[in-house]
Amino acid sequence: MTAALPATSLPAASTRPRTVVQPVTFGRLVVAEWVKLRSLRSTWWTLASTLGLFVLLAANRTAGMASIADHMPDDFLVMPVYATSGVVIAQFVLCGLAVAVITGEYRSGQIRATLTAAPTRLPALWAKLAVVVGVVLVTGTIGTLLGWATSAFWFDALGQSIDLTDPEHARLMLGVPLYLAAMAALAFGIGAAIRSTAAGITAMFGLVFIIEPAFSYIPIEPLQKLAAYLPTAAGSRLVTSDTVGSFISGTQSTTLGPWAGFGVLLAWVAVTLVVAAVLLRRRDA
Amino acid sequence: MIEAIGLTKRYGDKTVVDAMTFTVQPGRVTGFLGPNGAGKSTTMRMVVGLDRPTAGSVTVNGKPYAQHRAPLGEVGVLLEAKAVHPGRSAREHLLAQASTHGIGRRRVEEVIELTGLGPAARKRAGKFSLGMGQRLGVAVALLGDPHTLILDEPVNGLDPEGVLWVRTLLRGLAAEGRTVFLSSHLMSEMALTADHLVVIGRGRVVADAPVADVIALAGTPAVRVRTPDARRLAALLTREPGVELASTAPDVLEVTGITTAQVAQVAATAGVPLHELTLTQVSLEDAYLQLTGDSVEYRSTAADATTRPVAGAHR
């Protein structure tokens, strides 16, 4: 009966309190990924420059519209488009961050520490994804609000405003953080599959800048139809005003509705992440 | 305890780890010795599930590593000097690893203290010297207070004080009943730190025995005698039963099968002057070279000079 033993008979070593070690859970992995992301200075530079871009582009576009408003039909004065025009460049910055968050682990060797702490691997990938998507959603929301506040300086001159009870206004404003988060998830999936920062960023930007426009500029009807289903063209429908068109993709295609387009982007994201997950399970780290 | 059974790793048609079977017991320091490219690091990576074995299996404390619900509490691992993002501080790195297992901040500070990282804990890991990187690696390994420690070249890059610290630490952890498995290419360090050795060459286990037994495999100690009258002493010594002689220089004899006292006695009786009389211990290095001699991956060119391809081999 161990209970009958007096406490003094225990060996000295066990009087030292043993470190409390708890099982790995998804929540704990999310906390760890957040600690990792926040402890890199580059994260904060990236997020700050994203917000700066929202302010700058909102000011630039809205002021530009104010100067030519007299020659513009009212249909074109959809304020949310100009207030959130930072999204065009912010998407590249945030996608770069999303790629680097995962490829940086491979470059530095950090991935070995990550995977020895989470040897079943996939939970670590999903935890990292959750943190990236969360941070991009928050940054996109703050950016959108800053863009709104900035462009409001010219609202009087334009005789316009942003009205969230207007369905299109609400969709455009709400769509920006959602679109950015989905694009970041796509970039993260590409980075996780490719594992190299340079190749990952090249692949992501090549997709948006080269492959997608190439499809839409080739004057063959079926290819142009297909172009509407490519990730950026489809996803950016959510942040595209039907009258003004899109600053993001060159296409004016309305083949897909805003939410259907966003759904197509999410499908691309899902496929990319499945590929990344299968590769992570299979490959040696 | 670590148990590898038929552990094999192939990359294409190159077999890096070839059906290795060994057990690393708790309560002692087990050294993992082998030439570069022998498969030490690959084996260690398979133990913690970073590399998938082509065949065979390996368990830690009775289960495959990945099946432990709190692996850092079972196994502490130091694989490379730096498995840290260069932009992150040592403290934040430890905190991130600790967070995955709900390990508190107090333990993070404890291992920083224990490994002497204190003054550098806020510094970014990219600015660390090799030695500081190793200390951080050891700190990470100790974070979960694990039963088993796996360390790949832990003294690499450490200053003499650091080497002594690691040696004392590992011996202490083994004395507490933990399993300590470390690789090193520094034979002298292995001789001082390890109790037991697993020696590998070309991906195969060539010896799995206590350090003393491994040394004994390389042969018995010899008596070295230096005398101006080597020829006469040699003649006298060969009369003794079981004695074998070799001469490495005109005035030097290497004698086996006899003690230094017996040699001195023979010499004194015959009036042979002795300038030197030493017992030459076989070193772990000798034993190691003998065991792995034919399994070295990268041989110096001098050794290869005799094995040049013949002209007929060209097509």
Image (cartoon, rainbow, N blue to C red):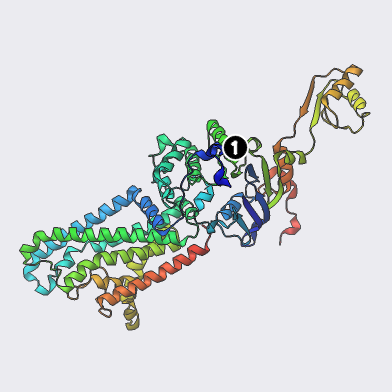
Where is the C terminus of chain B found, in terms of image quarters? bottom right
Chain ID of residue with mark 1: B
- Work out which residue is located at the far right of the displayed protein and give it: B239
Residue A260 versus residue B301 in the image, above or below:
below
In the figure, residue A259 lies in which quadrant? bottom left
- Work out which residue is located at the far bottom of the displayed protein and give it: A221
Q: As drawn, is A119 to the left or to the right of B95?
A: right
- Work out which residue is located at the far front of the displayed protein and give it: A4
**In x, y percent, where is residue B249?**
81, 28
Which element type, helix, strand or loop, lies under badge 1?
A: helix
Q: As drawn, is A51 to the left or to the right of B149?
A: left
Which residue is painted at 32% across and 74% down in the image? A263
Q: Nearer the viewer, residue A217 or A16?
A: A16
**In x, y percent, where is residue A189?**
40, 64
**In x, y percent, where is residue B125?**
42, 43
Residue A124 versus residue B160 in the image, above or below:
below
How many other residues sit within 10 Å of disc 1, few (<14), some (14-19) or many (≥20)?
many
Which residue is painted at 32% across and 83% down in the image? A221
**In x, y percent, where is residue A31?**
37, 54
In the figure, residue A133 lies in which quadrant? bottom left
Which residue is painted at 36% across and 61% down in the image? A130
Query: In the rendered image, is residue B150 in sight?
Result: no
Residue A93 versus residue A241 in the image, above or below:
above
Q: Which residue is mark 1?
A: B171
Q: Nearer the viewer, residue B117 or A66?
A: B117
Query: In the rendered image, is residue A9 in sight?
Result: yes
Which residue is painted at 39% across and 57% down in the image? A27
Q: Amino acid at mark 1?
A: Arg
Q: As drawn, is B42 to the left or to the right of B286?
A: left
